[in-house]
Amino acid sequence: MLEKSLTTPSDVIIYDLEDSVPPSPADKTSARARLAHFLSTRAGSLPSPERIAVRLNSNATPFFAEDILQAMRLPCIRTLVLPKIHSAQDLHHVSEEIFLAYRGHKYRSPDDPPVQLVASIESAKAMYNIGEIASWQSTWGAAMGGKLAALLFAAEDYCADTGIIRTTSRQELLYTRSHIVVTAKAFGLGAIDMVCVNYKDPEYLRDECQDGRRLGFTGKQAIHPIQVDTIQSTFVPTSKEILRAAKILKQMEQAHLSNRGAAGLELEGGGMEMIDAPMIKQAENVVRIARAAGLPIPDVA
């Protein structure tokens, strides 16, 4: 499975030391050692560091301290996925260990890119404290203590903690998912949607992806390689959305040249839609994401 991970086109590969590994100390130690050996002996074939992440065991477990030390020893690991973040204090604890790895162990240089942290939201307490989690900044600064980059929704753990019964409609998780997105956007963070556990139903996966994108999530977790293509193709603008955005930007450019703050955009089925400043921002976001994904931006008159 480690070797196969090198062939996946996913944006980020998460090597899991937590729930994918049995909870015995021997299994945790063995998994940690195998991963360290794999990443330290594949220098020529590894993806770029921006694509490599490790999910550590929770900072409340006896495995956390060695997990983070091992991760910090390997410069190719730039992102740490942190399970069971219930409060900003949990992030502070993680950040302190990162700081000690820099200052005490000198495993990395502060001139290296900051360690990116992804906080997993998986409990009622985390939702209650989500504002303080999202606004957290390291006492030692991003360069020495890590930088929070995204909030990730762990739906199964959250349902287990809250007693919510997960259904295929996802209605019972609408509030939680929306709250995570809005909070993440308020603090400039990525918002990563829940796993689709029904990985053998591609149509349901696509529907769940489209739902997540409409809610504002910037990406989605995958638990199987066959999910990656669907997720990546869904979390980018469609050709129709890109064309509309390009038209809006062109129309508003012409309107501004004519000293007008709004313009009309012809609709496909007839009629006109008024476009103004807020729609410019939406269109710019669409074009930005499309360019980042390498999608063509049409020239419009």
Image (cartoon, helix red, strand yellow):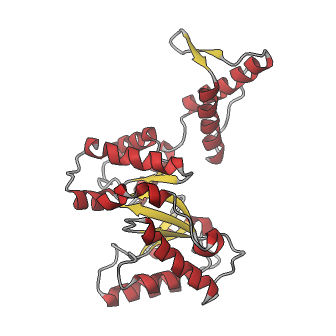
**Does residue 269 appear left or right of residue 63 in this picture?**
right
- Residue 181: horizontal and vertical position, in percent? 45, 47
Image position of 175 with respect to 45: above or below: above
| Total number of numbered discs in the rendering | 0
State the image quarter where residue 45 is shown: bottom right
Residue drawn where x is 35% and y is 81% of the image: 61
**Does residue 137 appear left or right of residue 192 in this picture?**
right
Image position of 9 with respect to 268: above or below: below
Image position of 266 with respect to 182: above or below: above
Asked whether 198 or 142 is in front, the reply is: 142
- Residue 79: horizontal and vertical position, in percent? 54, 69
- Residue 92: horizontal and vertical position, in percent? 49, 72
Residue drawn where x is 33% and y is 90% of the image: 26
**Quadrant including the C terminus:** top right
Asked whether 229 or 210 is in front, the reply is: 210
State the image quarter where residue 283 is shown: top right
Asked whether 120 or 201 is in front, the reply is: 120
**Quadrant including the N terminus:** bottom left
Residue drawn where x is 47% and y is 70% of the image: 91
Work out whether residue 230 can be spotted: no
